[in-house]
Image (tube, rainbow, N blue to C red):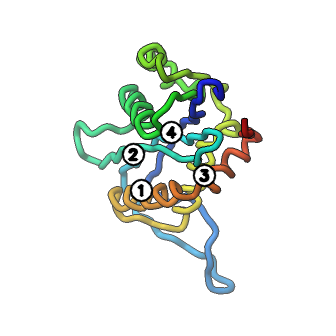
Amino acid sequence: MREQGAWLVFADESGLALRPAKARTWARAGRAPVVRVAARAGRVSLAGTVCVKAGCRTRPVYRMLVHHPHRRGEKKGFRERDFAGLLDAAHHQLGGNMVLVWDNSTQHVDALLRRLPSARSGWLTVYRLPPYAPDLNPAEGVWANLKHDLGNLAACTVDQLADLTHTRLKRMQYRADLLDGFIAETSLTMTSP
């Protein structure tokens, strides 16, 4: 990787629904806090990367899909072409070769995604993690931090949830120290040449 001057790119997906995650909050003494949420459909699907290269600022690249309930023809999640588009966007933003590391999830071993490295052989090399290895992927830290941040917020619509998600991820873009912490949690190290 270092000989190629390549970015090490960890990729993963996640999703959010209108029902907020359980989180700690404050309440009056002796009273349990209660957050009431109407059971509504709708989902925000996320695909993102944590990109690291020795001597460069660590940065995320992500894409979001919003699925509104009762809208026909709207994507409910990321497809193979969406993942390819995410990687192309990351390559464009990073401006260099990439070594992609992602899990062996069923959507990643689809025929189109198996052909992805050969179609982009000039700048993309792919390595796979075991099927479920969240402790090895720093992108999992991004999703955990995001969900923790949104834990006590109860969005009324899926568009509000998407806006909140976008704001939190945008803030994270400027926190290279936070992203480096997610990498450190995996016990991976980046050493200087």
Count neighbours of disc 2 (C-alpha within 10 A) and say few if under 14, some if 14 to 19, many if 20 or more. Answer: some
Circle 2 residue: 64
Answer whether residue 102 is visible to the viewer in this image. Answer: no
Give the image location of residue 73, x and y in percent. Answer: 23, 36
The image's mark for residue 166 is: 1
Separation of disc 2 and disc 3 at Cα?
A: 16 Å
Which tag, 1 or 2, sits closer to the chain's start? 2
Q: Regarding mark 4 in the picture, which secondary structure is present there?
A: strand
Circle 4 residue: 13
State the residue lying farthest toward the right.
187
Q: Look at discs 1 and 4 and give the one toward the viewer.
A: 1
Count neighbours of disc 3 (C-alpha within 10 A) and say few if under 14, some if 14 to 19, many if 20 or more. Answer: few
* Residue displayed at 51% across by 39% down: 13
- Label tally: 4
State the residue lying farthest toward the left.
72
* Residue displayed at 22% across by 39% down: 72
Mark 1 belongs to which amino acid?
His
- Relative to 164, say whether 7 is above or below: above
Which tag, 2 or 3, sits closer to the chain's start? 2
Which tag, 1 or 4, sits closer to the chain's start? 4
Circle 3 residue: 144
Q: Regarding mark 3 in the picture, which secondary structure is present there?
A: helix
Question: 129 or 6, which lies in front?
Answer: 6
Quadrant of the frame with the C terminus: top right
CB atoms of marks 3 and 4 within 8 Å: no
Quadrant of the frame with the N terminus: top right
Q: Look at discs 1 and 3 and give the one toward the viewer.
A: 1
* Residue displayed at 69% across by 52% down: 181
Residue 139 placement, left or right of 87: right
Q: Regarding mark 1 in the picture, which secondary structure is present there?
A: helix
Count neighbours of disc 4 (C-alpha within 10 A) and say few if under 14, some if 14 to 19, many if 20 or more. Answer: some
